Image: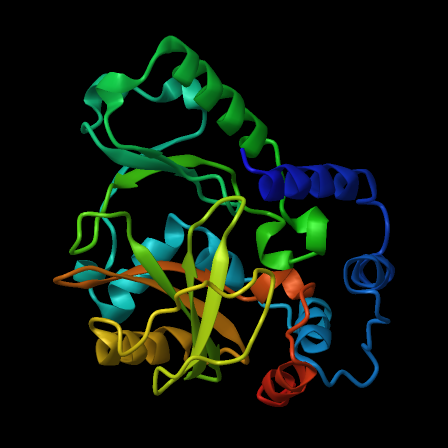
Amino acid sequence: MDITQKNKDKSVKIASLLRWMPNKIYLKILYRLKTGRKLNLKNPVGFNDKMNWLKLHNINKSYSNYVDKIKAKEIVKDKIGEEHVIPLIGVWDRFDDIDFSKLPNSFVLKCNHDSGSAKVIKNKNDLTEQDIKSLRKHFKHRLKTNMFYFAREYPYKKLKPQIFAEKYMVDESNYELKDYKFYCFNGVPEIYYIAKERGPDTRMDFYDMKCNHLDIVNIHYNSDHPVIGKPPHFEEMVEIAKTLSKGFPFVRIDLFSTKDNVYFAEYTFFAGAGLYLFEPEKWEKHLGDLIKL
């Protein structure tokens, strides 16, 4: 587990102890602690102010189905076709229900109800008893975690926690998939970012819809060598992002691109949980202006 994930798990634990606190008061305190700023809910202007306003005022029960990583696969199949969905291998309520002998040699294990729980198994025959013990501890902890209480993102509150396995995918260079995350406003993708070197030194680079690198810093620093030029299947990814984001004031659509296809990754309604400011300041306001409340 990297330092970032340890800190996140600690924050979730502390937040669970404060679950009694009303959402509005809790968010104001959390926002001040995370950003050093006062949360503006009366007249929200910036992107993150509006993210938190939406948490409190744009309550839509159907959002839970979109953020559930298992149910979202069925939604996306209906919207853009099964060929864009990473195949599901199995679903379990408990880690000890998993029969590893029936799984393929390579696969990915993750939870449906959280963020950052994924474990990539490239060769199950290399798993030791200690590896299985570590995986069991990891997923038992994750199944007990309710992500709602950290940042009061309501779609996560009543999800049934489950573990699922999906096909292990690689890109054209036989490396792990590169993900493209599109910020969409009422069905219109405006910017996207690519995350690289995931772990303690994750880097993020933002681009406009002409694939120009932008001077945005958010959560992580830019990479030393940002991607230059148009990614593979870019036009197809844009059209998919448009289709999947229709009807939402804001949603981030995460996609994977391989040599031959584009795959859906997940829906995110509150980017960065509404707690990470965009720098320079102009981007906080510009992206906020795109959200129509």
**What sort of colour scheme is used for the picture?**
rainbow
Residue at x 82%, y 77% (from the top left corner): 40
Percent position of residue 198, x then y: 45, 49
For this view, does 139 lie left or right of residue 84? right
Percent position of residue 116, x then y: 50, 44
Residue at x 24%, y 81% (from the top left corner): 235
The correct choice, above or below, for 160 with respect to 239 in the image is above
For this view, does 18 lie left or right of residue 267? right
Q: Nearer the viewer, residue 218 or 249?
A: 218
Q: How many labels does the image show?
A: 0
Quadrant of the snapshot with the C terminus: bottom right
Q: Which residue lies furthest to the left in this view?
A: 260
Residue at x 63%, y 49% (from the top left corner): 157
Q: Which of 247 and 18 is in front in this view?
A: 18
Residue at x 32%, y 37% (from the top left corner): 108
The image quadrant that residue 208 belongs to is bottom left
The image quadrant that residue 9 belongs to is top right
Percent position of residue 94, x then y: 45, 24
Quadrant of the snapshot with the N terminus: top right
Percent position of residue 132, x then y: 40, 16
Q: Which residue lies furthest to the front in this view?
A: 224
The image quadrant that residue 260 belongs to is bottom left
Q: Nearer the viewer, residue 145 or 129?
A: 129
The correct choice, above or below, for 122 with respect to 86 in the image is above
The correct choice, above or below, for 235 with respect to 112 in the image is below
